[in-house]
Amino acid sequence: MPVRISRRHLLAGLTISLAASPLPGSRIALAAPEPVEVWKSPTCGCCKAWVDHLQAAGFAVTVHDVDDVEAVKTAHGVPRALRSCHTALVGGYVVEGHVPAADLRRLLAERPRAGGLAVAGMPQDAPGMDMNTGEPYQVVLFGAPGGGTTVFASH
């Protein structure tokens, strides 16, 4: 007696099969996580919590624990007024401080002509700080042609 398979089950199985192992040359591609490199102090807990936030959002994070994070900031052109506790590179941009993962995704999708994003200082409600005080903070775009900064997002 032949086995009857519904079209719905056949398509579901085919979708799962193709997603699990795309054929060479096929147009199905699994998105690789966006690589992020982070430089932080080896003893900073909020930096580790921010890294965890990025990983939970699907970013592939490489961490460099360094004693002199200021040298990294200077080397990548982070303005003094925007500095925080850690510095990262993603998609050709510099990311300073506790920038939310959603804002990184937006930055990578829009690709503005700029140096990067920053959350100056250590706002209590930013990812990695997570104090839930309701205190607003801003994510700033810096290094655009013509200089200056602009508000990229308000939280």
Image (cartoon, helix red, strand yellow):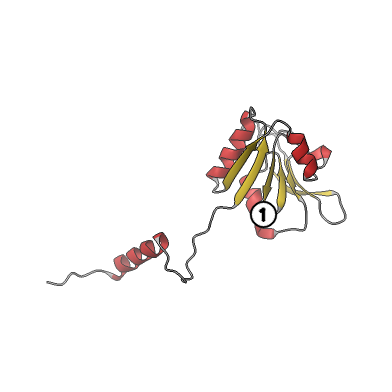
Residue plotted at (83% across, 38% down): 80
The single residue placed furthest to the right in the displayed view is 146
Q: Return the residue nearer the eye: 69 or 31.
A: 69
The answer to which image quadrant residue 54 occupies is top right
Identify which residue, 138 or 81, lies in the foreground: 81
Q: Residue at x 57, y 48 (%)?
A: 59
Q: Residue 99 location, x and y as percent?
A: 67, 43
State left or right for residue 63 relative to residue 11: right
The secondary element bearing badge 1 is classed as loop
Numbered-mark total: 1
Residue at x 80%, y 41% (from the top left corner) = 74
Q: Could you tell me the amino acid type at mark 1?
A: Gly
Which residue corresponds to mark 1?
91
Quadrant of image for the N terminus: bottom left
23 up-or-down from 93: above or below: below
Q: Specify whether residue 129 is in view.
A: no
Identity of the residue drawn at 77% across and 40% down:
73
Q: Is residue 111 above or below residue 124?
A: below
Picture coordinates of residue 30 (x, y %)?
49, 60
**Where, by quadrant of the figure, is residue 23 drawn?**
bottom left
Q: Residue furthest left?
A: 1
